[in-house]
Each structure stands twice: as C-alpha cells, then as structure tokens.
Amino acid sequence: MSDKISEDTQGTDGKPAEPRDDVVTTHHTLSVGDRELAYTASTGRIVLRKEVLKDGAFDGHKPKAEVFLTSYTLDGAEPGSRPVTFAFNGGPGSSSIWLHLGLFGPRRVVSGDVDAPEPPPYRLADNPETLLAHSDLVFIDPVSTGYSRTVEGEKPKEFHGFTPDVEAVGEVIRLWTSRNGRWLSPKFVAGESYGTVRAAALAAHLQQRHGLYLNGLLLISSVLDMSTVMFHEGNDLPYSTYVPTYAAIAHYHGKHGDRPLDEVLAEAEEFASRDLPWALARGSRLSADERADLVARLARLTGLSESYVDRVNLRIEHVRFFTELLRDKGLTTGRMDGRFTTWEPDGGREHMSDDASISRIIGAYSAAFNHYVRTELGYANDLPYEILSLDVNREWSYSDFEGRPISVVDDLSAAMRANPHLKVHIAFGYYDGATPHYAAEHVLAQLRIPDELRDNIDTAYYPAGHMMYVHEPSRVQQSRDLARFVVDSSNR
C-alpha cells in the first residue's frame, strides 16, 4: 500500500504553486536468514530552500531545488539507537542507483557478470545481504541526477560544483535527520567514486556547519586527491599509482602465466613506490642501460610490449592502456572494471570507443529502477531518471581549488582530528581502472592525523572492479564487511 503527500500544481492566483514535497510511503517485508524484516520505504522529492536576505533583512526561505531520495526504515526499531546510512554515488553526475540496487538496498538488480551478462528485459531479486538489516538507509540523488532538479527559474549549474554540491547534500542530510528525529542515532555517510570526495568533505562540513558528527564513513572505490588519477603534463604521480592496477588487469587476462595475483601485486607496488618515480624524475639523466632495464620491467608487469613502453617514455596513460593491452586480439578492456572486454571496431584507435564495464550493465540498472520505483515504491514521475549525466560531469566546477590540487585530504584529516571517534572504511577493487587501489593507499598515508587515529581506518580488497558488487562473490563478502563495520562503529 502507499500513501502520497499531495501537491497542488497551480496556485489560486493562476501562477504555478510553490513546490512541495511529494513523498510516497510503502510498506514491505524481507526475509534475511531466519529473520523477517518489516520496513517502510519513503520515496520522492523534498524541497531545498535558501534563507534570503533583502536589504539586510530576512525575506523568507526561497525554494531552490527538489531533491529525490529513497529511504528505508525498519519498522518497530528504536530510532535513537538505530544507525542510519546516507548513501550516494559519484560521477560527478551520477545518481545513487548503483549503491541502491547493486549493494545496499533490500532489492537488487540481477545484472550478471563478465562471463554471464543478464539479457534484457532484466529482473530484480530480494537482497538478503542488505545493509538494512543493520542500518536504516537514505539514498540521495544530487541535483540534476535521478529525478532531482532545480525549481523553476533556478540555474542547475549553480549546483554543479564542489562546494554547492556539498552544501546541498549536507542540507538534505540535516533535514532528514531533523524531520525523522535521528540526531541521537549513529550516523554514517557512504559514497562511491567521486562520492568519496563528497563524503570526506561532508564529514567536515556537517561538523563545522551543523555540529552533526558522524560515526563512520564508507568510502567505496576511493579517490580523495585527484592528482593521483589525473594525467596531465607536469604530474607524474598517476603514471606510478596506476601500475599495480595495470598489473592486476594484465594478470586477469593471462599476461602473468600462473603467478599468484598477490605476488604480481607485491612486485608492482614495490616498483611503483620506488624505481618508477625515481626513473620518471631522472628523465634524460637515465643511462641507456638503466632505461632499458626499466622499460623491460614495466612492460613485463603491465603486459605491454617493450617497444610501446619505450615509445610512451615509461608513462602509460590509463585509457591508452585499456586500448592497448589486448590490441592483438582486437579487444579493449573496461575502465571501470578491467575484467570486461569488448571488440574494438577500429584496431588503430589510441582511445577505446566503449567501456564495456558500463555498457554491459547500465541497461539492467536502468530497467530495474524504472520498474521498481513505480510498481514497488509507488512513485511516478514523467521526468527521465538521469542515471549518469555527462552534461553535469562536463560542466562540473572545481573553482574552489584554483591553483592547487583537487583534494579533500585536509577535510578528512580535520574531521578525524575533531572527532576522534570517526571511523573510516575503504573498499578497493583490484581491477578498478577509474580509482586504482594503490593511488588511494598513497593518499591514506598522507592524512594529517596522529598515529593513534590510523587505527580508525579499516580497509577491504576485492578481486573485482570499480563497482565490485557486480562480481557476486565480492558482493556477498563486501556486504558482510560493511555490516561488520557499521555494527562495530555504532557501539556506544
């Protein structure tokens, strides 16, 4: 059954009515082991408002945007002691569909995996591993993603940037916490990919702006310092931090024979931490013998030819790698998940024409959510559900970081220093070519926190890609790891 908060579409003066929340509630049950979970889902858009001053005087709260969210709360639970996790994906420009239907939610999409992709029209299944068994859940779609939009007369671009995005998502968290009486609940923020940038910044913002302290951050496929993953002239760091990921993907595709993955990774990480950065800094000062040795070692680790490594001057850019590794077979590997491959129609391309690790699964997620939101959650909206907006991504503003690296290392460090109880869980996928694990490890080592707070950091590694839950064994294990982290970090 569902109950919907009604919304007038026209005011008494004939003008469009001021936007109002249009949240729908539905009631469900789910079997989790020998337990039956009864829960309530609340789905819809809430209105974000901004305090307006005119000539120095308060002039009301002006509607700015309508943000779509879906929350799940366990029926009969004591709100004060029940944890709640606020979750979103990244992009920038991504909706929360991936974490919602891929990992956390009570229902999940069956998308298949590398060797057995699910055919259309796709399907949904119960998720007995759902985090709802241990925490209430709130999935947030930032402005211009999902069904979230600015109100009439407001410019979407004003929300498409680092600071306005953090402020808007932070306001959603504050509103939901206040309206649902959850200020004394253990609170967690979960982000994936760029969502980890948002999550780390939110930890500091919520503390400083609202005095809202978190119990934990769940950082999935983490990137907290963009200089570790952005290839451009004068920044040699990614050419090293990506090497262990290149080696892992090469191993998956048979380039390392029967060597164990952990052995290959250990060698690659040692090379990436010492010899390669030194070599890149030396440049033309390398002797011919030194250069030849480094070219041979880097080629062997990455599965590329020595002639290619030599031609690119020991600097292997990631999209080039995905295009080059299996060129002799007419294939390219995925960026989000290097296990995936697809046929490349132009064997001479430098940059692959398709990322199979996205194109092979996005149809399943799209069909599943568009069905689920209407038929099971009872919410109808004629807007297209923006799963991943490239327009938002292209116009995203990092103006706050002009003249300096795009990094939230200081934000997370400050949040942990101010709140020494804040725990941080980081999940890595070995075949993740978007946010490589070794780059994230490099950043974690740079956190400006006392040694005793490093025990607050929890890590987990999976033989999968950026969305490691696409790989079924990883999804099951990751669900256990996240549940353990939330339970342990919620204890008073």
Image (tube, rainbow, N blue to C red):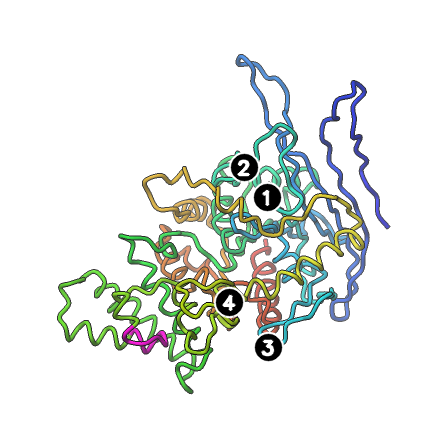
| Residue 355 at x, y percent in the picture | 51, 63
Q: Farthest residue to the bottom: give it.
A: 258
Closer to the chain start, of discs 3 and 4, is 3
If you read the primary sequence from the N terminus, does the residue marked by circle 1 or circle 4 appear first? 1
The question of residue 304 being in magenta is answered with: yes
Label 2 and label 1: CA atoms lie apart by: 9 Å
The residue type indicated by label 1 comes to: Pro
10 Å neighbourhood of mark 3: few (<14), some, or many (≥20)? few
- Disc 1 versus disc 4: nearer the observer: 4
Q: CA distance from mark 1 to mark 3?
A: 33 Å
Asked which secondary structure carries label 3, the reply is loop
User: Which residue is depicted at the point 69% across and 67% down?
Assistant: 110
User: Which amino acid lies under the numbered mark 2 shown in the image of this protein?
Assistant: Phe
Going from N to C along the chain, the mark reached first, 2 or 3, is: 3
For the record, the magenta segment spans: 298-307
- The residue most toward the right is 1
- Label drawn at residue 159: 2
Label 3 sits on what residue type? Asp
